[in-house]
Image (cartoon, grey):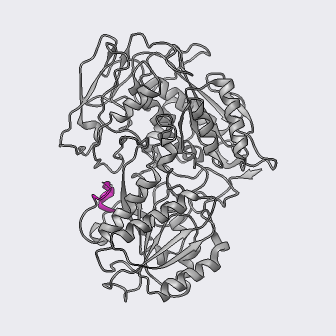
Amino acid sequence: MITAERDWGRRYPPLLVIAVALVLAILALPSALNLPEANPGQTLEYAPVPGNQGQAPPGGNLAALGLGESSAGLSQGGGGLGAGLGGLPALTLPPGQGAVPSAKQCVGNPPRQTEDPLSPPCVAFFNGDNGGATYQGVSRQEVRILFYFDCCIQYVGTTHGNDVSPTQTYYDLNAAPQQSEPVFVRALRGYSRYFNARYQTYNRFLHFYVYYGSSDSNHTTMISPEQRRADSVENHQKLKPFAVENFSTFNSQAYLQAMAQRGVLNFGYSALGTGVFAGHPSTYFQQFSGLVWDFLPSLEHQAKLVSSWICQKVVPYPVSFAGDPTMIGKPRRLAMLHTTDPGFPDIQRYAQLIKQQVTACGGNFVADGTFPNACCGISLDYQESAQNEANFKLQGATTVIWGGGLQNTDPQAATSVGYHPEWILAGDRGLESAGNAGADDQSQWAHAWSVSNVLKIGPFEGEPCYQAWNSSDPASPGPGSFDVSLACTMYDEIRELITGIQISGPSLNPASMDKGYHAIPHIASYNPKVPACFYDPGDYTCVKDGEAAWWDPAEQAPNNTSGTSGCWRLAEGGLRHLIDQWPGGDVMRQESQGDPCNGF
C-alpha cells in the first residue's frame, strides 16, 4: 500500500510515493468572449467591450464585458432559483431525473455566473431545445463526466482519518452516498451540486462518475501503459463519457491517448501526485486537437515566461541580491542546476529550454550541475550536491538558475562550502511552494527569487474552491482541513470543463467547445488572483502570464501548517505579466517590503 503520510508544507514524496501535492492553482477563464452560435436563434451572444484597449481593469477581465442581445430561448440577468455562496440551498437530484432548474442566480455588474470572479458571463435562463444527443455522452437530459484517479493511496489526516483509495471501483455521484467514500468522491459530490445549481447547462444534468483505476502486482500506482489503456477501454464501454478529468499519475498519457482515440474530451491535472510539473509539451495537445485541454500553460510557454524574466531582469545587470557581499556589483556569471531524473522528462526539457533561451539573450553560463531525483532527493543527493556547489564556487558563478525539480541538498551544500550566490527558481508548482522553501537552508533562500504561473492565494476560507464545496454541502469540512487542500487541487480543472460546456451553447460537442474557448480575447490581467487566460490559435492551454516573488524568511505564509517559517512575497503586490512584458530595471527594482505573502 502506498502511503501519502507526510508533512504537506514541508516535503514532497520520492518517486515511488504518490500523493496529491498541496498545490492550489486558482486558474480559469476570466475573459470576454463570444458565445458560439451552435443553435442560432437560441444563443445569447456576448461581445467584449474592453474598457482600456486590451487591458483588463483591476477587477479582472470580466469587468470589461458588455452583453449582446438575447433571444427568446436564453436570457441574462440576476433572477432565478438559488442563493449566493454561503446560502445555496440543498439541490435535490433524484437518480435518473436529469434536468436541473433552468433559472440561475447570477451575480455582479456586468453579471457573471457565480461569485467566483473567474466564472463565465451570466446565462441565467434557458427554455429552448438543447438538441438532445449532440455527441457521445450527451443526451437531452445529461452530460456524462468521468473522474479518473489512482488507486492505492492512503491520505493520512483527512476528516475520515486514514483515507485509502480503492482499486477498480466506480462511484455514481447521482446515486446515494456509500459508507466511507474516499475524500475525492466526497468533495466531488459537493462540486457536482454546486456546478449543476449555478452554471447554465441548458437543461442537462452534469452527471459525475468516479473511477479509481488498476494497480500493479505490488498494489501500487506504478502501472504500465497497457494497464492504463485497459482502464480506458473498461471506462468507455461502461460509461461512454463526454469528457474525462484525468487525475492519474504514472503513464497517464497512455490513458489520455486511448480516451481521445475514442473521441472523449480530456481535462485534468495529470501530474497531481508527482509534486512538480512544468507543463505538457504543445505536441501533447496537438496530437488530438480539440480533445485535450489544460489550465496550465504548455511546457514551452512556461519556459519562455521564466527565460524572458531572466533575460529582461537579470542578464543585462550586475549582481544585486547575492548572499556574498563581494559578488554585489560584479558581472553575472550563471550556473544551471537541473535534474537528470528519467521519470520527469518535462522537467528535464524545461531546464534545457530555459538555458537555451537565456544563452540566446546573452546569458553567460560558466557551470552546470545535476541531481538524480526530481522529487525528492533529500539526503540521497548530497554527494552530487556537494560536487555541484563546489564547482559553481570554483567557476565563479554568481547566479544559480534552478531549472525545476525538488531536492533540498544543494542549498545545504552551498552553505557547507561557504558559497552564497543569487538563486533563481524556475517555478514548477512545487519548488516555489512556501512549505518547500521554508524547510530548506534559510541563509540561501534569503537571496532567492522565483518566477511562476501560480496566483495570489489567501486563506482557504476566502478561495472559490472552498466556497463552492461549503456552499453546496452542509457536511463539508472546515477550510483548514486536509480534505479542502485536496479538493482545491481539482477545482480549476473542473471549472475549465464546466465553463466550456456553458460557453458551447445548447449544441454541445468538441467543435462548439473549441469555438467557445478560442473566442476568448487576448487580454492581460492586472489582478494578482486572476490569470490572463486565453487560447492562441492551435493552442489548448489557458494561463499565459506569471509573477515574480522573493523569499522572506521572517514571515509566515497563509495556509502553511508545516511549522516552517518564511513566505514568498509577491513582487509588485503580485502583479502579473505576459512574456516579455516585465517591468524595466534590475530584479531588485521589483522588490518592496510591502509585497504580500502568498498562500501557495
Residue lying at the far left in this picture: please name it. 52
Residue 381 falls in image quadrant: bottom right
Q: Quadrant of residue 591?
A: bottom left
Percent coordinates x, y for residue 260 in the rendering: 57, 34
Q: Which residues are magenta?
A: 571-581
Give the quarter of the image for residue 152. top right
Name which residue lies at 45% across and 63% down. Answer: 353
Residue 87 shows in the view: no
Residue 190 magenta-highlighted:
no
Tell me if residue 10 can be seen.
yes
Where residue 149 sits in the image (x, y, percent)?
Answer: 64, 40
Front-most of residues 380 and 539: 539
Q: Position of residue 220 (x, y in %)?
A: 75, 49
Q: Is residue 102 left or right of residue 578?
A: right
Q: Is residue 577 magenta?
A: yes
**In the rendered view, would you say 275 is above or below 192?**
below
Q: Is residue 45 left or right of residue 156?
A: left
